[in-house]
């Protein structure tokens, strides 16, 4: 078996409304060996992975997939179920999968759900290896595979603290995105409603507060001045100063670096000059300034304050082992480290205990070695600090905090100025006010870890991630989402996307727009290129000023990566016609329709709208079936026979009536605008743009835009390179009319034909091409359509896409001449030369139809060009004229 393609679909896609992995799998000779021809494969699989019995498959009951395997199915189906179950075995709960025949024998499209992209892809690769071994009768050792997948999982997983915030956000339907690979920098929400955080530091955390927390001496000074108990101490710059400070403060003392975290370089309960020197050197290794403080006898407590409120409190104890009269201290450490909750660093809820110099010193002070066998119940402390990152444990005490202690801790957060703060408090307990016991705040932490509160070793877990999300999004009805409009179809996508954006801007909104050509933020171009896929969604939804997102969605993006969002507020389906058939296993119009309807299938059910073209039979059949939310139809026929019931239910239809674009609802008719006043309609000659105008109006109305604002938008949107680059851009000078457009398929040209005939009065001179990945018949048909629209045609070629140079142009050329032998057709492979030849040929009364890729270059060339009049041609003279 061979994996031909393997990638993650990161949003709703052709196969599922949810994120899936797509695998194009060649099973080669196994096409002739369905599973019922492989003796014992089902029994062997069940012994290898007993939990595979839970897979119901199409049978609909436990053991269903194993029954399919015994009855006979293909290797791709086995790979699908293995990829699903391998993810379950490493902790990701997934269940959906599908295996589909392709148009190529022995090649299958395998899709399956994933939670973590890297783990999902790795599971697919492992599934192919295991399936091949099962078919070949080889033994399979599952343990190395599971270990490898766990390594991938752990390498890509969010840390516990970040994960708790992301999970809490998703529980409120707030979208979450990792912004920079390899970090925990995360965005919650979209556009202007977004909030960002890194680890547990939020975008509203004050930099001064962080600076204070990072300087222990500054922290102590602020708190001491405010009457908060802190240990007496001194900043030292040499060991001699440290020794003098210890004598002044009074032994025992603590040494720590001025700046640091996770207990690094901290030594406690120092009682001798020798230990002081070791403690000083340990702190100096982390910072050149060393603090010497009075040692406070008491328990180590971590207090977590979020948004000014104490939300969790835990007692921390340093890493330790408890004797059993049998095992040595080293053996007890090994037993403790075998706890599955312990991992490396912050990957798990607890951290592995590492034996280091501090461990040996602690044991030596207690009179122990690693070979000591402790008595039953005897405790050996292995670290001097209680940080979880050094192997410590935590006991939740949130419910035991005295009101005075609570007030003091919340006051510390305000004094330092942090919205998320971890306060290290040494105290005998938390049930008494601090002034009634030995106690002091020894440190505060910006970006504190949440592990000890989420899953304490003992006591009640606290939902601290929820507290962060509730602080960032205090309104429980705010899910951080901005309105999204997604627009698709075979033709008209870019025009409708730009027009919808224009209407929303006219209505006063800050709009982010992605389409074929650019990504724009409030009329400013930030990216150039083909942004009709998920890349545009990513760019727009991450922009902090955007209030509305309007996104063109093409079939290529849907098939390659899925949508770049999980749901939209308005989905627009303009039309479904033959284009790009034969690519990515989309060979029929029904398959293309399913691809396009992903956009309306992803509209939110409650409060969402689907805008559908009622004049397109495929849109009516497929779009109406898959549409979620309320449907708004648009049609050129106000008496459309299939919309009577829709109107009688007081739902909306946009149509043309008495020369006006109108909104119909029940028996009510609301005039929006005269068709002849809509610039892109070309006084009604451009019927396709009348439809695009209705679609854009429907999208705006779905967002609640007032009719007056819709009207203003339609009246002020012009077919110019500034507002509609490359879409029916119209010029006229010296009696020559010129139309620049991007149309590269038959349906687009059929839509243009009425406009061309309405504008042209003499010769029609065309320049055209198409990408080489169209089918031969499609390219010939394109040539035939061009022949019906042009008297003189120049065919060029810019994007062969796998064909031999000149092959695409030759097919278009032959299609044109076969359709109409009277048409003059010339092939000029260079686009620039073809455009130059057409311009040079044009004279007064001619019409230029330039279907080009280089929109800007062609427009600039035309701006400085003059055309001869009939009189000038007769006299041989020529004046300089410009467009």
Image (cartoon, grey):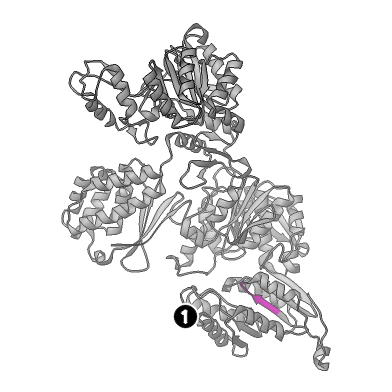
Q: Nearer the viewer, residue 850 or 776?
A: 850
The image quadrant that residue 316 belongs to is top left
Vertical position of residue 47 compared to residue 293: above or below: below
Give the residue furthest to the front: 240
Residue at 42%, 65% (x, y): give it: 585
Image quarter where the C terminus lies is: bottom right
Extent of the magenta region? 848-853
Question: How crowded is the residue under tag 1: few (<14 C-alpha within 10 Å), some, or many (20+)?
Answer: few
Residue at 29%, 56% (x, y): give it: 128
Is residue 50 among what the camera can see? yes
Is 852 within the magenta?
yes
Residue 146 lies left or right of residue 217; in this view the side is left
Residue under pointer 1: 804
Residue 318 lies left or right of residue 661; in this view the side is left
Q: Which of 820 and 375 is in front in this view?
A: 375
The image quadrant that residue 322 belongs to is top left
Q: x, y (%) of residue 211?
A: 58, 31
Q: x, y (%) of residue 865?
A: 76, 78
Q: x, y (%) of residue 474?
A: 59, 30
């Amino acid at each position: 078996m061979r994996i031909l393609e393997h990638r993650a679909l990161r949003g709703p896609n052709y196969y599922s409304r949810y994120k899936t992995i797509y695998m194009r799998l060649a099973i080669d000779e196994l096409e002739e060996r369905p599973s019922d021809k492989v003796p014992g494969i089902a029994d062997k699989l069940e012994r290898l992975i007993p939990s595979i019995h839970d897979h119901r498959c199409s049978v609909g009951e436990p053991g269903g997939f194993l029954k399919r395997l015994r009855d006979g199915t293909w290797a791709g189906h086995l790979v699908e179920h293995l990829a699903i179950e391998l993810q379950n075995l490493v902790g990701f709960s997934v269940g959906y999968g599908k295996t589909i025949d392709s148009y190529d024998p022995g090649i299958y499209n395998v899709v399956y759900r994933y939670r973590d992209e890297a783990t999902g892809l790795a599971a697919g690769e492992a599934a192919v290896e295991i399936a091949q071994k099962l078919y070949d009768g080889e033994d399979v050792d599952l343990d190395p595979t599971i270990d490898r997948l766990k390594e991938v999982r752990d390498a890509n997983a969010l840390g516990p603290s970040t994960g708790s915030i992301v999970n809490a956000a998703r529980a409120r339907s707030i979208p979450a995105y990792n912004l920079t690979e390899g970090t925990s920098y995360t965005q919650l929400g979209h556009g202007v409603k977004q909030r960002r955080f890194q680890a547990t530091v939020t975008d509203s955390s004050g930099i001064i507060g962080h600076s204070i927390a990072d300087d222990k001496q500054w922290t102590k000074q602020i708190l001491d001045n405010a009457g908060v108990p802190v240990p007496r101490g001194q900043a030292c710059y040499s060991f001699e100063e440290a020794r003098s400070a210890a004598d002044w403060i009074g032994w025992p003392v603590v040494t720590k670096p001025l700046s640091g975290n996770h207990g690094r370089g901290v030594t406690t309960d120092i009682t001798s000059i020798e230990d002081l020197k070791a403690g000083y050197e340990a702190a100096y290794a982390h910072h050149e300034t060393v603090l010497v403080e009075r040692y406070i006898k008491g328990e180590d407590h971590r207090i977590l304050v979020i948004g000014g409120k104490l939300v969790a409190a835990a007692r921390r104890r340093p890493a330790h082992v408890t004797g059993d009269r049998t095992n040595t201290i080293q053996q007890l450490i090994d037993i403790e480290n075998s706890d599955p909750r312990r991992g490396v660093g912050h990957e798990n809820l607890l951290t592995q205990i590492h034996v280091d110099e501090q461990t040996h010193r602690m044991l030596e002070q207690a009179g122990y070695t690693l070979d000591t066998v402790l008595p039953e119940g005897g405790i050996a402390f292995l670290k001097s600090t209680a940080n979880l990152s050094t192997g410590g444990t935590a006991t939740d005490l949130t419910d035991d905090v005295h009101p005075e202690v609570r007030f003091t801790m919340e006051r510390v957060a305000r004094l330092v100025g942090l919205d998320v703060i971890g306060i290290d408090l040494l105290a005998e307990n938390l049930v008494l006010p601090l002034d009634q016991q030995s106690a002091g705040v020894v440190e505060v932490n910006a970006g504190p870890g949440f592990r000890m509160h989420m899953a304490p070793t003992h006591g009640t877990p606290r939902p601290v991630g929820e507290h962060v999300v509730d602080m960032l999004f205090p309104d429980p009805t705010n899910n951080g989402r901005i309105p999204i409009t997604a627009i698709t179809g075979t033709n008209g996508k870019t025009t409708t996307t730009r027009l919808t954006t224009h209407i929303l801007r006219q209505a006063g909104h800050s709009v982010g727009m992605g389409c074929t050509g650019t990504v724009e933020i409030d009329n400013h171009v930030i990216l150039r290129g083909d942004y009709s896929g998920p890349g545009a969604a990513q760019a727009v939804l991450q922009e902090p000023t955007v209030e509305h997102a309007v996104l063109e969605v093409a079939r290529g993006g849907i098939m390659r990566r899925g949508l770049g969002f999980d749901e939209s507020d308005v989905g627009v389906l303009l039309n479904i016609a033959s284009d790009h058939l034969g690519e990515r296993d989309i060979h029929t119009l029904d398959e293309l329709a399913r691809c396009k309807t992903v956009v309306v299938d992803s509209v939110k059910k409650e409060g969402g709208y689907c805008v559908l073209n009622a004049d397109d039979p495929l849109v009516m059949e497929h779009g109406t079936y898959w549409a979620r939310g309320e449907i708004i139809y648009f049609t050129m026929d106000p008496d459309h026979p299939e919309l009577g019931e829709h109107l009688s239910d007081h739902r909306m239809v946009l149509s043309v009536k008495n020369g006006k674009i109108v909104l119909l609802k029940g028996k009510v008719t609301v005039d929006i605008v005269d068709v002849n006043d809509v610039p892109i309609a070309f006084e009604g000659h451009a019927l396709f743009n009348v439809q695009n105008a209705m679609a854009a109006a429907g999208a705006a109305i779905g967002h609640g835009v007032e009719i007056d604002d819709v009207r203003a938008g339609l009246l002020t949107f012009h077919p110019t390179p500034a507002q509609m680059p490359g879409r029916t851009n119209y010029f006229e000078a010296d009696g020559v009319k010129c139309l620049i457009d991007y149309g590269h398929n038959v349906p687009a040209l059929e839509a243009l034909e009425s406009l061309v005939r309405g504008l042209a009065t003499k010769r029609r001179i065309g320049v055209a091409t198409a990408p080489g990945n169209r089918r031969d018949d499609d390219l010939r048909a394109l040539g035939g359509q061009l022949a019906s629209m042009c008297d003189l045609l120049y065919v060029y070629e810019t994007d062969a896409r796998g064909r031999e140079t000149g092959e695409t142009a030759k097919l278009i050329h032959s299609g044109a001449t076969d359709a109409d032998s009277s048409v003059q057709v010339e092939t000029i492979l260079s686009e620039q030369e073809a455009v130059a030849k057409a311009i040079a040929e044009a004279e007064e009364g001619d019409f230029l139809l330039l279907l080009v890729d280089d929109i800007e270059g062609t427009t600039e060339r035309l701006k400085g060009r003059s055309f001869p009049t009939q009189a000038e041609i007769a006299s041989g003279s020529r004046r300089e004229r410009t467009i």
